[in-house]
C-alpha cells in the first residue's frame, strides 16, 4: 500500500496526479502507479481536470500508457493527443529558440534562457524527460541596456510587440518583461518574452552576481549561455511570486528536479546570502518546503532553518500547501491572494503591492479590459473587491 503521508486525505484522482509528479522527479517512484491503479476506482473526468490544472498531461500519458487495462480509453486518447502535441510544439520551440539566441550572439547580446527554455537546452536536468515538460512562451533574460537592440532583432524576424491590451509604458516601467509574438500558419504562433529582471520593480537589486556566474555549454555546435544552477532556481521560485497560481505541480517538479540534478553541488551559502540580501527568504523557504512535502526530498536542516522566517509563517505555509495544492476547482484569484502573503519576507510588502497594484494588473486579475470606465471604477473600489474574493472562497 502506497504511503501518502500528509496527503492521505486527498481524492484518489489527486493522489494519482501526485504519483505522476513523483515519478517525473524520481524514476524509483514510478512503480507505485501500477500498485495504485490496481487498488483504486477513479473518476477520469475529475483526474483530467486536476492533471491539466497542474500542467502535467504529457507526463501522465507516458506513465499511464503502460496500464491500458486500468484506464478509460477516452482518457488515454486525450492524454495521448496532449503528449504528441506537446512533443511537436517543443521541437519547433527549440529550433526557434536556437535561432533567436544565435542572432542575439551575432550582435554580442548575452541572453539567458529562463524556466522551460533553460530546461530545453540544459538536457542534463530533465535528462530523457525534457520532452514531457509543457511550455508555451520562450522566456529569455538579458541586460536592460540591450533590450531595444534585442527588440529590433525580433522584429526583423517577424515578431510584433504583444501588449495584451495594455500600454507599452506599463510593461517598460511597471513590469519586468515584454512579450513578442510571431504568427504562423494555421493560427499557430511563437511567443517570446524578453525579461530584463526576474521580479517586478521593488527597489531591491536582486542577484547582483548573476551575470558573473553564468556558464557556457555547447548545443548543436553553438555556444549557449545559461544561468548558474542557484540563479536558475531563484528564477523559478520568483516566478511563483508573479501574477497567478503559486501551486501547480509542474513548477514544483521543475524546482525539485533542478535540486536533484545538482545535489551536492549547490552553493547553499550563496543561496541563503542572496535570499537575505534580496528579501527572498520566505519564497525560498516556501519552495523548499513544497519540494520536501510533495516529493519526500530531504532538504538540509540548516537550510530550512533560514533565519528571518518565523515559525508561525512556516506553519501557515505548510497548511497552505496541504489545503490548497489539490483544490483544483478553487478560484485561483483566492489562492493567489492567500499565497501572496506567504511569499514575501515583510508583511507590509505584499499588502502594499496588492493595495497599490497597477490598474493593468488589477484588470488581468479580474479578467477586465484595462482602460474602460467600468474597470476604472472597480479599481477605485478594489479593496472591497479583494475582500469579497477572499470571503467567497475561504477555506
Image (tube, helix red, strand yellow):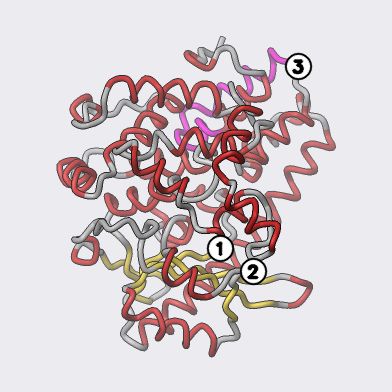
Q: Are marks 1 and 2 in contact (CB under 8 Å)?
A: no
Which of the two labelled residues, at mark 2 and mark 3, occupies the earlier sequence position? Answer: 3
Dot 1: what SS? loop
What segment carries the magenta color? Answer: 21-40
Counting from the top left corner in percent of width and height, residue 159 is at 58, 81
Task: Decide: few, some or many residues near mark 1? Use Cα within 10 Å; few <14, some 14-19, many ≥20.
Answer: some
**Quarter of the N terminus within the rendering:** top right
Q: Of discs 1 and 3, which sits in the foreground?
A: 1
Q: CA distance from mark 1 to mark 3?
A: 36 Å
Q: CA distance from mark 2 to mark 3?
A: 46 Å
**Quarter of the C terminus within the rendering:** top right
State the residue at coordinates (47%, 61%). 117
State the residue at coordinates (84%, 37%). 74
Which residue was labeled with disc 3?
41
Task: Decide: few, some or many residues near mark 3? Use Cα within 10 Å; few <14, some 14-19, many ≥20.
Answer: few
Dot 2: what SS? loop
Which residue was labeled with disc 1?
137
Looking at the image, residue 81 sits to the left or right of residue 203; the answer is right
Check residue 348 in the rendering and tell me which mark sits there, or answer none. Answer: none
Which of the two labelled residues, at mark 1 and mark 2, occupies the earlier sequence position? Answer: 1
Which residue was labeled with disc 2?
165
Looking at the image, residue 2 sits to the left or right of residue 330; the answer is left
Counting from the top left corner in percent of width and height, residue 132 is at 57, 48
Dot 3: what SS? loop
Image height check: is 381 above or below 92?
above
User: Who is closer to the viewer here, 34 or 153?
Assistant: 153
Q: How many marks?
A: 3
Is residue 33 shown in magenta? yes
Which of the two labelled residues, at mark 1 and mark 3, occupies the earlier sequence position? Answer: 3
Counting from the top left corner in percent of width and height, residue 32 is at 56, 21
Q: Of discs 2 and 3, which sits in the foreground?
A: 2
Amino acid at each position: 500500500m502506497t504511503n501518502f503521508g500528509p496527503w492521505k486525505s486527498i481524492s484518489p484522482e489527486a493522489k494519482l496526479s501526485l504519483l505522476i509528479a513523483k515519478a517525473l522527479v524520481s524514476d524509483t517512484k514510478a512503480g507505485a502507479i501500477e500498485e495504485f491503479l490496481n487498488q483504486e476506482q477513479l473518476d477520469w473526468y475529475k483526474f483530467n481536470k486536476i492533471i491539466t490544472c497542474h500542467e502535467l498531461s504529457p507526463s501522465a500519458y507516458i506513465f499511464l500508457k503502460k496500464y491500458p487495462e486500468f484506464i478509460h480509453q477516452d482518457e488515454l486518447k486525450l492524454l495521448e493527443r496532449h503528449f504528441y502535441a506537446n512533443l511537436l510544439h517543443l521541437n519547433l520551440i527549440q529550433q526557434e529558440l536556437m535561432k533567436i539566441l544565435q542572432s542575439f550572439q551575432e550582435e554580442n547580446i548575452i541572453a539567458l534562457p529562463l524556466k522551460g527554455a533553460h530546461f530545453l537546452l540544459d538536457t542534463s536536468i530533465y535528462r530523457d524527460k525534457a520532452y514531457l515538460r509543457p511550455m508555451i512562451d520562450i522566456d529569455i533574460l538579458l541586460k536592460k541596456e540591450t533590450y531595444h537592440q534585442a527588440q529590433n532583432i525580433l522584429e526583423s524576424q517577424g515578431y510584433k510587440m504583444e501588449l495584451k491590451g495594455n500600454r507599452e509604458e506599463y510593461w517598460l516601467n511597471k513590469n519586468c518583461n515584454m512579450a513578442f509574438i510571431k504568427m504562423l500558419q494555421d493560427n499557430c504562433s511563437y511567443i517570446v518574452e524578453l525579461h530584463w529582471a526576474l521580479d517586478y520593480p521593488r527597489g531591491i537589486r536582486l542577484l547582483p552576481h548573476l551575470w558573473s556566474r553564468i556558464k557556457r555549454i555547447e548545443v548543436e555546435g553553438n555556444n549557449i549561455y545559461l544561468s548558474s544552477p542557484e540563479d536558475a532556481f531563484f528564477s523559478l521560485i520568483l516566478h511563483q511570486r508573479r501574477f497567478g497560481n503559486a501551486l501547480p505541480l509542474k513548477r514544483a517538479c521543475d524546482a525539485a528536479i533542478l535540486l536533484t540534478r545538482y545535489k551536492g553541488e549547490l552553493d547553499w551559502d550563496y543561496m541563503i546570502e542572496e535570499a537575505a540580501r534580496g528579501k527572498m527568504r520566505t519564497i525560498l523557504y516556501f519552495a523548499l518546503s513544497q519540494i520536501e512535502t510533495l516529493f519526500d526530498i530531504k532538504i538540509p536542516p540548516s537550510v530550512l532553518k533560514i533565519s528571518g522566517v518565523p515559525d508561525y509563517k512556516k506553519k501557515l505555509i505548510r497548511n497552505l500547501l496541504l489545503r490548497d495544492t489539490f483544490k483544483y476547482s478553487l478560484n485561483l484569484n483566492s489562492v493567489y491572494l492567500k499565497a501572496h502573503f506567504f511569499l514575501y519576507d515583510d508583511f507590509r510588502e505584499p499588502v502594499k503591492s496588492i493595495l497599490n497594484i497597477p490598474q493593468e494588473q488589477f484588470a488581468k486579475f479580474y479578467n477586465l479590459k484595462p482602460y474602460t470606465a467600468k474597470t476604472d471604477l472597480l479599481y477605485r473600489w478594489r479593496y472591497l473587491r479583494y475582500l469579497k474574493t477572499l470571503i467567497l472562497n475561504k477555506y
